[in-house]
């Protein structure tokens, strides 16, 4: 090949790579998105909705029961659902909502607040990892659903099913999968992502499993995994599971929201009246609480999630309503109780997408520390007839590649929110 042709080939390959990367920029491969922070990097989305809401692209009424979230990669959306007495991992076409394949992942999780799975699958290349409500962690080929391996959080890893089932979404980091079976053998476990074999356990950290999902962070020159339980907030070494730092957390009943790491600080919040706090991890891995007592009750987030955008945190606080909080000080910037009831939240393109858990109202607001500024609303329709009387609309909205995905039990709805 001539030098001229060689250079042309390199340029063409670079252009193709850039094109592919831009097309995949809006993928949502796991719980709370690429960085587990519920922040989408997408732009070019509708900044205001018409009175009827954004256009509905399709409705799938066979998602199965449960509260499983969405992972969206390329032309496929992955989720889980209960059909009959069996939980399934589902692959659904983004283009029309039709099912590509469904694979069983375990027996029914029966629960007074609604049966079925309640975590989000994780996609890593051509592999997908999904955890059922009873704690079965399964690896499949993402392309065709072919099974690769499976591990039980209980019988294989010594954990115990939490009161409301296993809800953790597995974290894939390089060659390993991180999960939290809990228990005396080590609460956090790293598995070989190709075989499911144990690489290490956090032997000195043995809290029981709760409902939060692990995040990864780089701090003090070390890669670490941060997890929240009812008793502790902990960071463990990514190489061997050894505890780098740990502090007490006064959790009650259930702790659910995912931790937030930024600038050497870890933000934690829980419902049931517990509140929030910010912890500084210094260069010696010593932990110190930042917030004063006067601000610790400003954010009491049950399970709808809290999102950090810029220097501020946003989410629903029990008893306070939708709230904006200063990340560094914990100070309340604003709160709104009347515009929308308790629910979950996601972020994209300077907008928050908020869903009322009771009636399915979906509201678009500006991401601003100055106050609640509404840019559109509609009510989720259709809604399930099979919802447990005690359950609500608890699946967080997902924004991926110009589309918004919402769910009420077996009903999954895809909307076009692109401004193009």
Image (cartoon, rainbow, N blue to C red):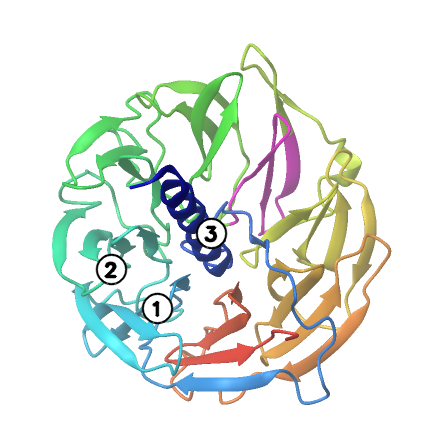
- The residue beneath circle 3 is 15
The answer to which of 124 and 310 lies nearer the viewer is 124
Category of crowding for the residue at label 1, using alpha-carbon neighbours closer than 10 angstroms: few (below 14), some (14–19), many (at least 20): many
Q: Is residue 292 left or right of residue 164?
A: right
Report the mark closest to the observer, 2 or 3. 3
Magenta segment includes 265: yes
The residue at the point 64 percent across, 28 percent down is 263
Which residue is outermost to the right?
A: 370
Q: CA distance from mark 2 to mark 3?
A: 27 Å
Q: Which residues are magenta?
A: 257-278
- The residue beneath circle 1 is 76
In primary-sequence order, the first of circles 1 and 2 is 1
Q: Is residue 136 left or right of residue 298?
A: left
| Element on which disc 3 rests | helix
In primary-sequence order, the first of circles 1 and 3 is 3
Circles 1, 2 touching at the beta carbon (< 8 Å): yes
Which residue is outermost to the top?
A: 284
Percent x, y of residue 215: 46, 39
The answer to which of 131 and 165 lies nearer the viewer is 131
The answer to which of 27 and 287 lies nearer the viewer is 27
Report the mark closest to the observer, 1 or 3. 3
- For residue 142, which numbered disc appears in the image? 2
| Element on which disc 1 rests | strand
The residue at the point 61 percent across, 44 percent down is 274
Percent x, y of residue 164: 36, 58
- Give the quarter of the image for residue 141: bottom left
Q: CA distance from mark 1 to mark 2?
A: 9 Å
| Element on which disc 2 rests | loop
Percent x, y of residue 172: 33, 42
Can I make out residue 237 in this image?
yes
The residue at the point 71 percent across, 72 percent down is 340
């Amino acid at each position: 090949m001539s030098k001229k042709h060689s250079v042309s080939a390199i340029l063409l390959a670079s252009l193709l790579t850039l094109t592919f990367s831009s097309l995949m920029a809006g993928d949502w491969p796991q719980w709370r998105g690429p960085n587990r922070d519920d922040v989408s990097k997408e732009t070019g989305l509708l900044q205001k909705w018409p009175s009827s809401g954004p256009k509905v692209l399709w409705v799938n009424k066979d998602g199965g029961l449960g509260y499983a979230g969405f992972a969206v990669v390329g032309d496929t959306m992955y989720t889980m659902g209960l059909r009959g007495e069996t939980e399934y991992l589902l692959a659904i076409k983004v283009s029309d909502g039709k099912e590509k394949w469904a694979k069983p992942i375990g027996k029914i999780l029966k629960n007074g607040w609604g049966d079925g799975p309640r975590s989000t699958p994780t996609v890593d290349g051509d592999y997908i990892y999904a955890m059922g409500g009873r704690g079965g962690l399964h690896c499949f080929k993402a392309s065709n659903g072919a099974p690769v391996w499976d591990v039980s959080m209980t019988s294989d890893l010594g954990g115990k099913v939490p009161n409301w089932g296993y809800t953790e979404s597995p974290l894939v980091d390089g060659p390993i999968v991180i999960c939290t079976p809990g228990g005396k053998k080590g609460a956090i476990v790293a598995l070989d992502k190709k075989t499911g074999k144990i690489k290490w356990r956090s032997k000195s950290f043995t809290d029981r499993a709760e409902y939060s999902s692990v995040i990864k962070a780089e701090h003090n020159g070390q890669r670490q995994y941060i997890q929240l339980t009812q008793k502790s907030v902990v960071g463990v070494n990514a190489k061997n599971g050894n505890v780098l730092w740990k502090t007490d957390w006064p959790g009650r009943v259930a702790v659910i929201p995912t931790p937030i790491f930024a600038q050497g600080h870890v933000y934690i919040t829980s419902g049931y009246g517990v509140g929030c706090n910010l912890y500084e991890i210094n260069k010696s891995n010593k932990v110190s609480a930042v917030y004063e007592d006067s601000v610790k009750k400003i954010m009491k987030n049950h399970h709808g999630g809290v999102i950090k955008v810029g220097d501020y945190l946003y989410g629903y606080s029990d008893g306070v309503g939708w709230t904006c909080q200063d990340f560094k000080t914990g100070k309340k910037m604003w709160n709104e109780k009347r515009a929308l009831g308790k629910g979950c939240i996601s972020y994209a393109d300077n907008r928050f997408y908020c869903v009322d858990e009771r009636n399915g109202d979906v509201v678009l607001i500006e991401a601003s520390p100055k106050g609640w500024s509404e840019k559109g609303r509609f009510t989720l329709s259709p809604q399930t007839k099979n919802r447990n009387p005690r359950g609500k609309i608890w699946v967080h909205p997902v924004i991926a590649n110009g589309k918004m995905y919402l769910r009420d039990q077996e009903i999954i709805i895809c909307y076009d929110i692109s401004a193009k």
